Amino acid sequence: MTEQHIAERSQNVVPVHTAGESVRSAAMPADHAHAVLHCNINTLAVERATAFHMLLFGLEPRMRSVGTDDDSAVMGLGSSTASTTTFLFDQRGPRAAPAVELVGWSRPRTEPARPGMATCGFTALGYRVASLAVFRARLDATGYAATEVAEGVSVRGATRRAVRLTDVDGVVVEVVEIASAAGDPSRAALVSHERMRCGDLEATIAWYRGIGWEVRARGEGAEGPTASLVLPEDPTFSLEFEQFPAVAGAPRPANVQGLYRIALAVDDVRAAHAALVAGKALGIVPEPVTFAMPDIPTGGFTVLFLTDPDGAVVELVERPRSTVLRPREPR
């Protein structure tokens, strides 16, 4: 597709915020997230999945945790589970970018996705690169294949040149071409977005606004309306929603292979919980839980698990603003 066609299609997506409008200087509400921490993928083979993202996208494993007897009842997996978790980061590093979190479940084991499971929720993990030509040369050198998206894909209010491929667990990976921002590693692949399906876009937007997301752009896709949502303090990552008609199916268990949940940082999880309960906008809100992970620098996490209107899992994790450094450049 030519640059002219890309530009013409971009006119169908209406930006909602300019660069400065989404950034708030005042204190955020307790139940509003301030950063994306990681995008979770359940994998059948942690080492193989790690090698894939390292080889193609230059990610580095910066944290690893092995759980042998964890209480995962809040996730529906029982009070004694075992898993290996690896956190991969792009060249911006742990404090300045979301991670790709790879989880290999061993008790119970990671299960392949089954027919009849929900078609809503996370559908693709997105990276951005400064040059698709350079990235395709990397693909050719490593023997992986990708499919060009002839019509481009919408990310943060513009139609981008893009290719799609699948990882070793069948996860769809979108790679979009976005010019490097000042200070970004010019030749690196950077974690950019996740694409999601929903049954009712307006209900979904209202739910995500309740935890701090804002609409960056709206548009119209092949199946219905679309919206791009960003966190005001973390505008280089977005959730790209597409409304699909008649989406349904059984909820995905927490150990099913593929994209499962996203983790967001809040200053204080218990304060966020109290605010959400008082506000009543999200319905029933479960109690926070603490996962001890002594083999990573933080020692573990206090987490509040939420589910959006279509059952996608969003976890609020206690990480004060002082521990993350997010760029304000909104590409």
Image (cartoon, rainbow, N blue to C red):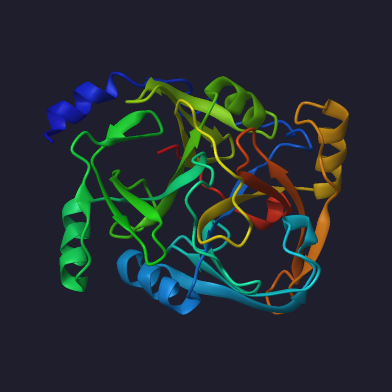
**x and y percent of residue 59 in the render?**
41, 67
Q: Is residue 36 left or right of residue 281?
A: left
Asked whether residue 97 appears in the rendered view, the answer is no
Q: Is residue 105 above or below residue 284?
A: below
Q: Is residue 300 above or below residue 295?
A: above
**x and y percent of residue 251 in the render?**
61, 46
Nearer-the-camera pick, 16 or 149: 149
What's the residue at 37%, 47% (across, down)?
182
Please tell me in which quadrant of the rendered image residue 90 appears.
Answer: bottom left
The single residue placed furthest to the front in the displayed view is 116
What's the residue at 79%, 61% (across, down)?
73
**x and y percent of residue 13 in the render?**
35, 21
What's the residue at 13%, 27% (across, down)?
4
Q: Is residue 25 left or right of residue 89?
A: right
Q: Is residue 83 left or right of residue 13?
A: right
Please tell me in which quadrant of the rendered image residue 1 appears.
Answer: top left
**x and y percent of residue 304 in the render?**
77, 49
The quarter of the rendered structure image containing the C terminus is: top left
Asked whether residue 61 appears in the rendered view, the answer is yes
Nearer-the-camera pick, 229 or 113: 113
